Image (cartoon, rainbow, N blue to C red):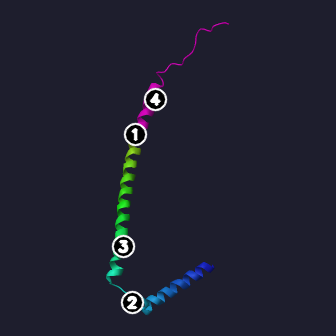
Amino acid sequence: MKPIVLTLQAVCLLGLGVLSGCTSTMPTSTAATRFGTSQDQATIQVLHKRLHERERTVAIQSYQIEVLSSQLEALKRIDQDTRPQRLPMRNSVTVAP
């Protein structure tokens, strides 16, 4: 019950802040806040590159898993097809000691 009351109070305070115009005093269109610093841009580019490489690696691994899965299924079918052809190895002659 208490978390609901706290959540309701937080929502009311946020609503009052928006309605009173307190949020309009924040800077809206400066180059630093819009685009970030050059260091931020460099970090974003590095992270973007790493993400692209990781996605490529995942795609390659997914393809390899797909190929291996199809090979495994083919081997299972071959095993099932050859299983009836295998004859059990039984000695029909028993050697007495």
Which sits earlier in the primary sequence, circle 3 or circle 1? 3
- As helix, strand or loop, the secondary structure at mark 1 comes to helix
Mark 1 Cα-neighbour bin, 10 Å: few <14, some 14–19, many ≥20: few
Q: Is residue 22 above or below residue 72?
A: below
Q: Is residue 85 left or right of residue 4?
A: left
Q: Position of residue 2 (x, y in %)?
A: 63, 80
The quadrant in which residue 93 appears is top right
Residue 42 occupies quadrant: bottom left
Range covered by the magenta-colored residues? 71-97
Labels 2 and 4: the sequence-earlier one: 2
**Pointer 2: what residue?**
24
Disc nearer the start of the sequence (2/1): 2
Disc 4 to disc 1, C-alpha distance: 14 Å
Residue drawn where x is 48% and y is 90% of the image: 16
In space, the residues marked 2 and 4 are separated at their CA atoms by 72 Å
Local packing at callout 3 (Cα closer than 10 Å; few below 14, some 14-19, many 20+) is few
Residue with the mark numbered 1: 70
Q: Residue furthest bottom?
A: 20
Considering the numbered disc 4 on the image, is that residue within a helix, a strand or a loop?
A: helix
Disc 4, disc 1: CB below 8 Å? no
Q: Amino acid at mark 3?
A: Gln
